[in-house]
Image (cartoon, rainbow, N blue to C red):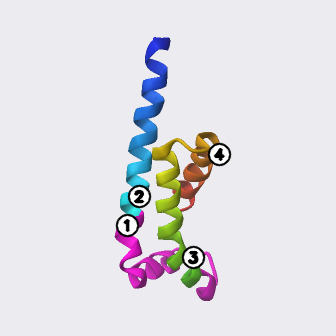
Amino acid sequence: MKKYQPWVGLVFRLIVGGVLVFAGYLKAFNPSKAKMAVRAYEALPIPVANILGVALPWIEIGAGLLLILGVAVRYTSIFSGALMLLF
């Protein structure tokens, strides 16, 4: 079983990284819908939600690329998990 552990982590890292890059890509080129999606949570003031709506797609793309490339995997995994829980 231990011989499969590195591969399992790699597969999950690539899948989650791919999902983040794809989700960020879809939102990055339609910022008005991304802003509306963040505002729909009604958890933040509108100006903050608008800024986060513009920044969030690029944050998702960056986190996804870090996971795919295997850079700072532990910290990026924690950050990505928190990002998915919040949004």
Tag 4: amino acid = Tyr
Q: CA distance from mark 4 to mark 2?
A: 17 Å
Q: Is residue 3 above or below residue 35?
A: above
Q: Nearer the viewer, residue 44 or 83?
A: 83
The residue stretch that appears in magenta: 24-48
For the residues bearing labels 2 and 1, Cβ distance under 8 angstroms: yes
Q: CA distance from mark 3 to mark 1?
A: 15 Å
Which quarter of the picture shows residue 26?
bottom left
Mark 2 Cα within 10 Å, few/some/many (few <14, many 20+)?
Answer: many
Q: Position of residue 23 (x, y in %)?
A: 38, 62
**Which mark is drawn over residue 52?**
3
Q: CA distance from mark 4 to mark 1?
A: 22 Å
Q: Secondary structure at mark 4?
A: helix
Q: Secondary structure at mark 3?
A: helix
Q: Secondary structure at mark 1?
A: helix
Mark 4 Cα within 10 Å, few/some/many (few <14, many 20+)?
Answer: few
Q: Is residue 27 above or below residue 23?
A: below
Residue most toward the bottom? 47
Q: Nearer the viewer, mark 3 or mark 4?
A: 4
**Circle 1 residue:** 25
**Circle 2 residue:** 21
Tag 2: amino acid = Val
Task: Identify the residue shown where x is 38% and y is 43%.
Answer: 15
Q: Nearer the viewer, mark 3 or mark 1?
A: 1
Q: Position of residue 83 (x, y in %)?
A: 56, 58
User: In which quadrant is the N terminus drawn?
Assistant: top left
Sequence-wise, which precedes: disc 3 or disc 4?
Answer: 3
